[in-house]
Amino acid sequence: MQFPLPLALLFFISFSNTLFANRVSDDVKNQDSIKIEQYLTKSRTYYTVKTDSAIYFSDKALQLSLKSNNQKLIINSQIECFYNYSVNRDLTNAKEALDEAKSTAYIINDSLSIGRVHSCLGYYYVLASKYDSAIAQYNKSLEICESLKDNKNKIHNLIGLGEIYYERGDLELALSKYVEAFKFEEVKYDNDTRLSLLINMANIYSDENQRKKAISYYNQAMEIAIELKDEDTLSVLYNNLAIIYQNNSDYNKALLFYEKSLDIDKKANNKAGIALCLNNIGENYFKMGNTDKAIVFLRESLYTNRQLHLETEIIYNLETLTRVHLSLGNFNQAYTYLDEGISLTKKLKTIGKRSDLLKLLAEYYNKTGKYQKAYSSMLAYNALKDSIQQKSRTDKIVELQTKFDSEKKEKENEILRVRNQCTQEKLEQEKMRAKYLYIFFFLALAVIFLIVILFRSKIKINNQIKIINGKLEDSNSKLKIMNATKDRFFSIIAHDLRSPFNAILGFSELIKSEARRGKNLEIIEEYNVNINESANSLFTLLENLLQWANDQRGILEFTPTQIDLYELIQSNLTIFKLKAADKSIKLFSDIHPNTVAFGDINMVNTIVRNLISNALKFTGENGEIFLSSVIDGDFIHLSVKDNGIGISKNNQDKLFRLDCNFTTIGTKEETGSGLGLILCKEFVKKNGGEIWVESEENKGSKFIFSLKSA
């Protein structure tokens, strides 16, 4: 386990809190203000050495500031008190001091102080394990820093956000925050900040198993820590280097570095650091096969972390203790630790670690013979992984929009460049004419000769202009098509994303209101069901939009292979089983085992999923959906038939077309974007087949598509 989040932020703040000190103008530098600043300097001297003395001097500075009524020094003193209480884990007094600083900052309307207070609030919520609130406060501070062009404060906020995203398991986003902070010129001349960033980036590369990069960054950090004589940081570096060696199965070398880190923390009486080292030594002994020693060190670490209320670190203790007891067959003890760990991950919303514990829960159920529960746990684990991937898909849609705007701008620049070239050539032509007209008055024969040259030159230029005009027309046509596609694309996004988002926002507000007022669990459950349905609808829409957009850009991979249609259909029927049960719809299939087609399995899976989803949407309660296949020469015709509301002949012509975007409300008010069938047509075409519909109103529909047989 690497350096924990609250301690990492505290480690950074301990040498960087003076970055945020407000400047006091010369006209208020009276005797009192000088004395106040002396108290603040003494407080920072004792900051991590003797917290009682640090609190004493910061309180003296605050009392004198209040007496002199110097508002900025009052804010500085209140924030200094906040940091000192935070080091002492006195979150109640820390929050009280910070609230007073915030109130004063807003009263005097000082943007620099307001930005600083919001940054401190971000750190407070990290200590309180309220990461969503911490992110909101850091982002608020970033907005203020951006308007003030305050790079030093901006760096601090970016590091704070990076630590939170790292703890939540979003390593890519965490690394982006660190890299953004590292680019600022101020980092080059601030060894403390540079040291923090090097350690954080090394931690990420270590987690990504990029050991060479991680060791390189750790070594750079170690040089700075030695130069600064920073024993606390050296302890962190020894700990993290030990993790790399442990992951590389060099357990003896790892133990050597862990013990170096532990010695430093014991000398400094750093209880949180001691707990961390004890946990890591316990893990190391477990991997060496010495479970007795592992349990001793892990229990001591857990006991210390409980005393310090470090909930994130408690999760790591519980996870490792679970693994040890599972290996020993102590299943009751293992489940006790595991259940507590999962509860804490839910509370802290640490998705990555919760995913690990769910997988471990499946292993526990499997070992105890509870196979159904093991299967359910694996489903929950996969669902959590999918939710993380869904966020990645959303980011890709944003990236797609950015790229589209960039390409549009490039096209516009190309048109301007061609027009400028045309204008320049016309100017050159005018210069040539003026020159030859001047010569005309002196030499008549030369004039005739020049006229011939000009005539030929004009023909050549006209030909060039025609060519350029042709290019312009082609560019304009392509731009119009791109604009039309873009307009259609975003009209779908604007229209179809609004409804599920409104439903989610509306019902979440209703849940909040009901929770405060009546706490009627039946109503809350009903609202929650609506939110879940809207979220599923939104996920389906985003997935279809992403696949369609990738297909339009030509980056969607097409990898044809042999497909067992029986297995593919059974898998999809299992997925839609619960959804069908909600409407009492029966799902049937007469597709026999070893019915093999040739195509891209991901595309075929998307086609089947969309067709079954549509059939469920437009089939009433107690209806039936029947999947069947027919071999026709070199092709297999796969059909999805329902006895739902059917489609009129006029509306059948609107299917599979983006320009019409035909959608219909389902039998239980279900909505859709129309992209599903468009995507089906695109994918069927790529697989060398065709898709069509047979339907009558009020008698049901039958969608058939063909695939090459294997």
Image (tube, helix red, strand yellow):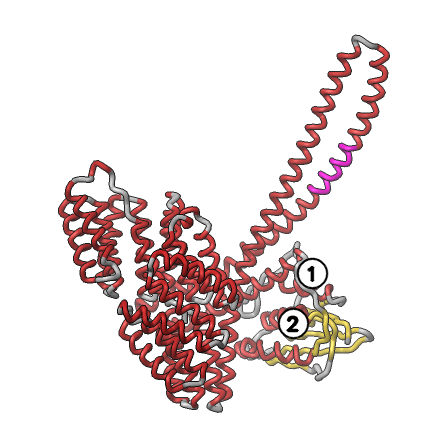
For residue 88, side relative to residue 168 (left or right): left
Residue drawn at x 24%, y 64% is 88
Label 2: how many Cα within 10 Å (few below 14, some 14–19, many 20+)? some
Residue 341 in sight in this render? yes
- Residue sitting farthest toward the left: 67
Residues 397 and 700: in front is: 397
Image spot of residue 622 (x, y percent): 57, 79
Q: Magenta-highlighted stretch: main secondary structure? A: helix
Query: Which is nearer the eye, 594 or 459?
Result: 459
What residue is pinned by disc 2?
A: 605
Of the pair 630 and 316, the residue shown nearer to us: 316
Magenta residues span 464-475
Image quadrant where residue 139 sits: bottom left
Q: Amino acid at mark 1?
A: Asn
In the image: residue 177, left or right of residue 599: left
Could you say which disc has been placed on residue 650 in the image?
1
Residue 476 percent location from the top left of the image: 69, 41
Magenta run includes residue 461: no
Quarter of the image where the N terminus is located: bottom left
